[in-house]
Amino acid sequence: MIDAKRLAKAATATAVEGVHIQRQITLPWKDAARISIRNVTLRLGRAAITGAGVVLGIAFLMSVWTGKVVTEGLEREQAKSAFSITQVGEGETAPGLEEMKQEKQSRAARQAWLVVMSLLVCGVGITNSMLMSVTERFREIGTMKCLGALDSFIVRLFLIESVVLGFLGSVVGALLGHVIMLIVFMIREGASVAAKMNWLHMGEYFVLAIGLGCVLAFVAAVAPAVRAAQMPPAAALATEV
Amino acid sequence: MARIECPECHYVIETTGIVTVCPECKADMTKAMEEAGRVERRVRGSIAKDDSVTTHEFIVRTKGLKKIYRMGEVEVPALRGVDLDIRRGEYLSIMGPSGSGKSTLFNMVGGLDKPSEGTCFIEEVDMAQLDAFELAWLRCRKIGYIFQSFNLIPVMTALENVTLPMIFAGMSTDEMMERGRMLLELVGLGGRLHHKPFELSGGQQQRVAVARALANSPAIILADEPTGNLDLQTGKEIIDLLKELNAESGVTIISATHDLKMIDASDRIVHIRDGEIERIELRSELDLQIGHLAGAEGG
Ligand SMILES: Nc1ncnc2c1ncn2[C@@H]1O[C@H](COP(=O)(O)OP(=O)(O)OP(=O)(O)O)[C@@H](O)[C@H]1O
Ligand SMILES: [Mg+2]
């Protein structure tokens, strides 16, 4: 049962000494990471909602990019065969090229627009989800501050959590968007599209998409996390959830 | 207070607690710490009036403490000027009806909120003068908080909850685990180390909270209605535990409560009403009244 005498002895070390105020307070990265990952794995519902926003945004982004790489591959093939045909009548190639160039430009603009939109939607989704996630945990934040956490610790915990979710979500999203788009093209243009596309280029887009997902998740979490961390502990503890 | 020199970079740390790594060069300080323990004792024996070990009679003092909450246009005065001196090692209860400002006072003293007016001193240090780091250090190392609703971190086990303040204090992992385990064993939860709060009863959760409050050997324990959510028997266990801690270790206990059982444990009872101190009673004066009360109940 309770052993108050020994407990008192264990707690005596500084109890009778004077308070000599210092400022050394720590949260090592390994502990921060452990706590954040714990929050992701144990609050799967919330994590899934935040993650889903990233998955959708990045899947869309990746489908656009996959489309781009595939059509580029197809065009390269076409240009090769067109070149061998028109080699004789040189004068007629110029207007054809001009047209192709224009179409390419407008397509690039359309794609850029889609990319920006998808990232925006994705960003708003994560911000909203993180805002809710932070609000749900006001009490916990207040408690941690009572135990000596600095505002920056709270921000750090939420940022790690968000980036972990951003990474996982964008890996899943990138694969999903890529695979779906590739299947669509295979049905439309035949299975040979996979052979025609530039896989190195595709790989670069993969890395870029996952990186963007992480950056997005990071940026989206900053505002909610900072706002929550700055609350005085008393106010954070008083919130009813 | 001990002055410890880092064996590697000769950086000097002044501390009352335990430092395991040098803040400058991250060298291992455990050895130096042990030696310092000896050094410190010698210092205290010979130079009693050393400035660094001076202790003040009053651990907490408040002067003209006011807190006004603004709800839109309406101003709600929660505290209307509280002057209170709390002695080191005292067991002080703050009693008063609901809404009288107990929790508000508790928040000011614990550095959890800023007063609208007036000052609160801890060890004669004006809390308003402290920066965020010093305030965090104070909350981490010098004050232990116990709440009515326990406020354990729900995703962490009992052991993780108890060791969290030790992480902030910079304790090494091994030391932390050992101390966390010991504290939980001593509050009778040695078999519940890896249980999550929702797997524990209210009384068990509150005992985890007590162990957590003791994690860094605080000088003050602030308890806001620690028995409010507990049944009679469990509540009494917690009170007895606090009382014994107070008697044995000299930790100052400040407790807000409705609970009449608290009266028996406390040295002084501060009655507050509408944000002002109504009267202060000493336990010695109270014995008579309690006897009277018990007599009345019996008859
Ligand atoms: N965050 C807040 N915003 C506005 N008013 C508040 C706030 N916190 C407390 N109050 C008001 O301040 C007064 C004192 O509240 P406090 O919580 O200190 O009372 P208490 O004595 O702890 O009551 P209880 O015993 O019910 O816990 C009350 O009138 C309350 O309505
Ligand atoms: Mg209260």
Image: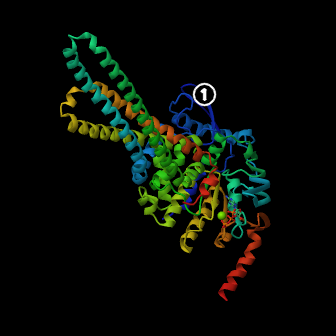
Dividing the picture into quadrants, the one containing residue A211 is top left
Q: Point out the image quarter for the N terminus of chain B.
A: top right
Q: Quadrant of the C terminus of chain B?
A: bottom right
| Residue sitting at x 48%, y 53% | B182
Image check: B182 left or right of B74? left
Label 1 sits on residue: B11
Question: In the rendered image, is residue A120 in sight?
Answer: yes
Return the residue nearer the eye: B277 or A43: A43
Q: Residue at x 66, y 85 (%)?
A: B297
* Of residues A32 and B295, the one drawn nearer to the viewer in this rendering: A32
Location of residue B50 in the rendering, given as x and y in whole percent from the top left corner = 73, 39
Tell me how many marks there are.
Answer: 1
Query: Alpha-carbon neighbours of circle 1 within 10 Å: few (<14), some, or many (≥20)?
Result: few
Chain for numbered disc 1: B
Q: Secondary structure at mark 1?
A: loop
* Left or right: B180, with B296 as reference point: left
The quadrant where ligand 1 appears is bottom right
